[in-house]
Image (cartoon, coloured by chain):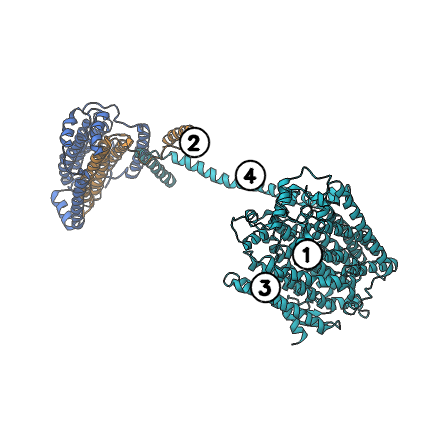
Chain colours: A cyan, B orange, C blue
Amino acid sequence: MSTTTLAVLVPLLPALGAVAGLAAGRRAPGFVRPLAVLPTLTAAVLAVVVAVRQGGRAPLTAATELTPTGNAALPVELALQLDGTAVLVAVLVGTVATCVQLYSTGYLRDDPRYASYAALVSLFTAAMLLVVYSDDLIVLLVGWEVMGICSYFLVGHYWETSAARAASLKAFLVTKLGDVPFLIGILALGSEAGTFRISTIVTRLTSSLADFQLDHPTVIALLLLAGVAGKSAQFPLHTWLPDAMAGPTAVSALIHAATMVAAGVYFVARLLPVFTASAAALVVLALLAAVTMAGSALAALAQDDIKRVLAYSTIGQLGYLAGALAVDNRGAAIFHLLSHGAFKALLFLAAGVLIHAAGTGSLTAMARAGGTARRVPDVYWTLTIGLLALAAVPPFSGFFSKEAVLGAAEHTALDPAAGIPAAAGWIVLVAGLLTAALTAAYATRLWLLACRGEAAVPPAAAPAPAPAGAAAEPAPEPARTSAARTGGSHAVTAPAGSLDAGTPDTEDAAAPEPGATEAVALAAADGTTVPSAEAALDTGRDPGPERGHPHQPPVMTLVLWVLAVPSLAFGLFYDWLPHWLGGGSLGPTLVTSVLATGAAAAGAAVTWAAWRHAVTYGSVDPGPALLGRLHRGAVDGFRVDALYQRAFVTPVQGAARLVRFLDREVVDAYVRGAGTATGWLGRAVRLAQTGNVQTYLSALLAASVVLVLAVVLAGA
Amino acid sequence: MHLVYPAVLAALLFSIGLYGVLARRNAVLVLISVELMLNAVNLNLVAFDVWLRDTLRAGQSLTLFTIAVAAAEIGIGLAIVLQVYRNRAGSNVDELRDLAEPPPTPTGAGAGSDAAEADADKAEAAA
Amino acid sequence: MTAPGFLSPTGVEIAFVLTGLVTLGAALVAVTTKQLVHAALWLVVALGGIAVEYLLLTAEFVAWVQVLIYVGSIVVLLLFGLMLTRAPVGRSPDADSGNRWVALAVALAAAATLVTVVVDAFRTAWIDLDTPQGSTQAIGEALFRHWVLPFEALSLLLLAALVGAIVVSRRRGGPDASDAQDASDAQDAQDAPDARGAVAPEEER
């Protein structure tokens, strides 16, 4: 088969798998798992084959006209473009999607809606692969919107909870808010460039022979940026992403870490010449990236829910990607996209297992319960690897990719190329360094709280020892503060301890159905973990007694290790990637390496110190001490939601109330008035019905006399 | 003889019968009034027949038919009146008001009934 | 037909007008009297007056039929009706309904309209009474030569009316003891409450 055929199969297989999965979901439950995993796996393998065959050489392009548009010069074509960027991103998407599907077979194995979930994930994967391979803006838009709707359904997977419903609606509406200008931008770009083909647009813009210029590059770039900001969760349209954590953790890993949010950045990377045509757009992009990464890193430092920390971290890393694009370095952006996709998927999946095991998503509760390393050692190690990659510690993948971004920013700041504003470089560089420190800080905090929780309870903070809790706890004592453990925070010690002991009675009592089997208990924990964590987050950070389960399906652990490999080692390909991605070297430069690593080390050190300090004074969370007066704002995302509430939701609701008032009191008044008037008229006429025949007859004869008179007088 | 004499007599007789139909309470008296009206019509028929010298004697024949129909009508009418009297304990026409609009519902009954009476008066005045 | 003036009435006209006045007066009393039986009796006078008018119009057969059927049977039937519905024999103050004034207005308006129109239309029409128009022979020939089919239909109508009258007036459940009670009560049932009292047990059965 030709490479093109294989590439066509890559998005097609998951789409067919989704259709088959939906069709088979109820009738043949046994086929659901193969139908979910196999097409995606095949697509991933094919994506690898395509990547190998393409091999970073000249782009392959194939097209067939899809539909006429009424303008013969501007057709919509089903076009593929296989360049190095596309095939690598496709490999990433396929790999992560496969991992997520495998993980989901364990994570959601008893979910009653697993079939539709798996089909939607497959459809989502297909859409993403379509976006990656597509060379036509309209076809790309189709994939883009299919991803949007899949995201809506998947975020709302636990639609029994109001948090999930609200989050899915919010995700949908906020991304659509960006998609409307995006659509306009695509149409404007298509009409100005005279084609919807991305490769043609790029060729025309970059060719030195043809003197082709867009008439309104800034307008188009800003319109497209709105859609990108919505999809990639960049400020100010980032607010949906933290809320989207109400979905299953696997969905968070797939959509909100590795693929969908990367689509926006990927789109910019594909159309980078359009953006570089406008210096203003680049500065705006750089500003957005800077605000996004710094703000989200601060917010991540204050979050209590592990998934929200990761969500804000995703926003921040996407800010890096946007920053790299703002300094016109596509290679660095794709490099970081790939490595971030790998380690963020790893982090989310590990967090899923961790939540699974701890029975709560709250970091504070995890810290108080402790025992992560002992109970789920695989998670402990893979989470550590992921966080090291996130914090850009050499030699993990995150270090190299982030260095590529910062190096590109430094290069632009000090030695700007033609048409690329140096301001963008400086903005990205400063914000990037600041964020590097903050990223290291929140990664450290996450690690300390989630994995080193046992050491968190100091003797000074211990209330009166709870003998029952202590007696019921056979858990091994940590080495350093073994004495402190006896007074452990009694709110969570007893259930956690009993779970540690694996006492079946207690566990069953915690499950909704007494006497339930282990599988049912796991299902209950599965179905309620995330919502309960969300609820706990919303109601004052007091998770209360939580459920948990010590046994994880082996497939989930396997996936974690599979993903840990690229997180660990992908960065070493920095020398090899430019061959695929084009552009200059992606190797780390000395200055930025030293600066960024130093910043990261400083951030980590400060966090550790703050943590020690906090532990001494009875808290487990170093966040408040680190952030100081910023903490309150950072907890709720710097009140962007409240701002939106005031700026959009309240006026819209007010307008709706006004319309309702007008409808009920003004428009309906006419309708009701017509009814009431008719009723009154009817009542008046009814009064004539006295039942007295003689009255009727009198009226009848009087009327006939009148008629006769009228005839006579008219004839006279 | 002037045709006006029988014609005016018939018109006046008809009006008297009309008054009786509308004003009498007793059903039998109403029937009596109806007979008066029928006779007024008969008188007209005969007068015009004589005036026109109709060879078919259509007016007089119709008068005979009318008399026969009136006899039948009186028979049926009296039977109905009798039945009404038996079932209703009275044969007053203005008490047979089963087809009247039922009294308004308690909500706003006072105003409604007042309005009803006022309206009934108004209707009678108009008639 | 030269129409003579109204100022030189013939003898027939004088007789017609006088009889008409009597007829109108009797009819007026019949529809206004408070005594129900008297109304029926005054109706006899009015119908008789009409019969005389028929005679004056040379319609002798119709006149005799009028006397025979109306005066002879219909009025008797009405009297029976009054009796069976226990009409009070004396003056009954509520013989007229509250609709009286409306009825008067309507009747006067109708009378005025009709008289005006009729006078206006037939002011000059003159009836030649020299050759009798309504002899029995002539009527019989016309009736059984030209009107025989309606005549036969009329016999069916009468039969149907007969059957209908019987069916309508028949008591459900057949004759029973309350008939005698009704008859005995008929004389002294002066007011409605008594009549209702007599009928109520019958209704309950």
Q: Which mark lies nearer to you, 3 or 2? A: 3
**Label 1, on which residue?**
A377
> Which mark is nearer the camera, 2 or 1?
1
> Are both tags, 3 and 2, on one chain?
no
Front-lying residue, A670 or A213? A213
- The reply to whether callout 2 and callout 4 are in contact (CB within 8 Å) is no
Amino acid bearing label 2: Thr
Viewed as shown, does residue A688 lie left or right of A269? left
Location of residue A263 with respect to A240 vertically, above or below: below
The mark closer to the camera, 3 or 4, is: 3
The amino acid type found where label 4 is placed reads Glu
Q: Quadrant of the C terminus of chain A?
A: top left
Contact between marks 1 and 4 (CB within 8 A): the answer is no
State the residue in front, A313 or A373. Answer: A373
Packing grade of label 3 (10 A; few <14, some 14-19, many >=20) is many
**Cα separation between marks 3 and 4:** 53 Å
Q: Is residue A237 visible?
A: no
| Rendered image: mark on residue C6 | none
SS assignment at label 4: helix
The residue under label 3 is A36
- As measured in the structure, the alpha-carbon distance from the residue carrying label 3 to the one carrying label 1 is 28 Å
Q: Which residue extends farthest bottom?
A: A1
Residue placed under numbered mark 2 in the picture? B107
- The residues bearing labels 3 and 2 have C-alpha atoms spaced at a distance of 66 Å
